[in-house]
């Protein structure tokens, strides 16, 4: 009789709640997997997206795009917060002029 097989995700995914809590080795593996998919797409000839490694590499490429979009959104939000804080500190507070 066949043994029990536990399926895991085809593409590693960082925890959205604690992305920094991941082990550095896992983060490195994730980045290398994404980079491999990107290089595979850029330099592969006659790529069959439906068979072989094609579906796996396409999943990894979409994962890379999603990851970059999420990080860019977070960076934009951080930049906006910093920009607003800087603008508030540089703008002199308005003092009401008393009528003569």
Image: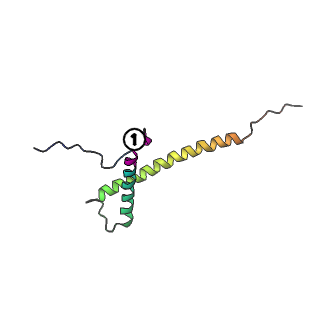
Q: Is residue 26 magenta?
A: yes
Residue 30 horizontal/vertical position (percent): 38, 51
Q: Nearer the viewer, residue 62 or 3?
A: 3
Residue 25 horizontal/vertical position (percent): 38, 48
Q: Is residue 25 magenta?
A: yes
Question: Which residue corresponds to the image point at 67% horizontal and 43% vertical from the top-left?
Answer: 87
Report the magenta stretch's main SS: helix
Read off the magenta span: 17-27
| Residue 5 left/right relative to 14 | left
Query: Considering the image in quadrants, where does the N terminus appear?
Result: top left
| Residue 64 left/right relative to 2 | right
Query: With respect to residue 83, does 62 lie above or below?
Result: below
| Residue 6 left/right relative to 94 | left
Residue 59 horizontal/vertical position (percent): 34, 53
Q: Which quarter of the picture shows residue 81?
A: top right
Would you call the spot at circle 1 few (<14 residues within 10 Å), some (14-19), or many (20 or more)? few
Q: Nearer the viewer, residue 10 or 26?
A: 26
């Amino acid at each position: 009789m066949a043994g029990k097989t536990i399926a895991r995700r085809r593409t590693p995914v960082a925890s959205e709640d604690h992305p920094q809590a991941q082990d550095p080795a896992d983060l490195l593996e994730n980045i290398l997997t994404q980079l491999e998919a990107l290089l595979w797409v850029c330099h592969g000839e006659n790529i069959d997206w439906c068979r072989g490694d094609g579906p796996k590499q396409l999943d990894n490429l979409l994962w890379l795009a999603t990851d970059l979009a999420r990080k860019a959104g977070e960076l934009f939000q951080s930049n906006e917060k910093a920009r607003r804080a800087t603008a508030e500190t540089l703008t002199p507070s308005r003092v009401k002029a008393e009528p003569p």
